[in-house]
Amino acid sequence: MTEMMLRWRHAWLTHCRPKTGQAFALRGFACIILLASLAPSLTYGKELQGRLGVGYNSEFANSATQRVPGISLKYGLSRDIAIEGIVGVATTSPSNSVTAVKLFKNVFYETNLNFYFMLGGGILSANSRTGAEFLGGVGVEFFIPGIESLGFSMETGGSLDNLGGNFVLKTLGVSFLDAGIHFYF
């Protein structure tokens, strides 16, 4: 193995092993930054202008116990601006659904990373209740070298929702398992 690969392996084994919950999302975000700093020759921003990404997003919490992952379409309007539409439904009893939109503003580019600000809003239904949720924060979309069409997102920030009847402000920290994975055409 090359020295760089050994450093990546060591960094993964000592700092990036998966944990649960929000700590995992924040730790994953830190690991991406750590790995990017160890391999500066691999870091250029990804050009997503005019490209359509198809994937999923389960960031909007339409239930405290069960999230409904939504099918997601993400489109790069320009080098710096992207938009994402999310639609999801579960036909459980009672049914759950999510319809949402997110806007992204890229602010910093690394080799296989795009750092961005994001804002989002959606209409949610869960347990026979309907409400709205608003998100805001920062995030990163990571592309594995050699597989440049596949983007993994991680985000942190805050959310405001009224699904329970009153508005609740919460901190937000989500790994690629919730913020989404997209394949770009």
Image (cartoon, rainbow, N blue to C red):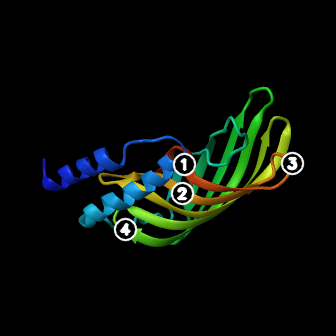
Which dot, 4 or 2, sits closer to the camera? Answer: 2
Number of other residues with Cα within 10 Å of mark 2, as a class: few under 14, some 14 to 19, many 20 or more = many
Residue where numbered disc 2 is placed: 155
Q: Earlier in the sequence, mark 3 or mark 1?
A: 1
Question: Residue at image x 25%, y 52%?
Answer: 8
Q: Earlier in the sequence, mark 3 or mark 2?
A: 2
Q: Is residue 185 visible?
A: no
Which dot, 1 or 4, sits closer to the camera? Answer: 1
Circle 1: residue type: Gln
Please, what secondary structure does the residue beneath circle 1 have?
Answer: helix
Residue 110 marker = 4
* Residue nearest the observer in this picture, 86 or 127: 127
Tell me whether the residue at label 1 lies in contact with that at label 4, contact meaning CB atoms closer than 8 angstroms. no
Circle 2: residue type: Glu
Could you say where residue 34 lies in the image, as x and y percent from the top left? 33, 60
Mark 1 vs mark 4, CA separation in Å: 24 Å
Mark 3 vs mark 4, CA separation in Å: 42 Å
Mark 2 vs mark 1, CA separation in Å: 10 Å
Q: Is residue 143 visible?
A: yes
Could you say where residue 65 lies in the image, as x and y percent from the top left? 69, 35
Residue where numbered disc 3 is placed: 165
Tell me whether the residue at label 3 lies in contact with that at label 1, contact meaning CB atoms closer than 8 angstroms. no
Please, what secondary structure does the residue beneath circle 3 have?
Answer: loop
Residue 22 marker = 1
Which dot, 3 or 2, sits closer to the camera? Answer: 3
Q: Earlier in the sequence, mark 4 or mark 2?
A: 4
Q: Earlier in the sequence, mark 3 or mark 4?
A: 4
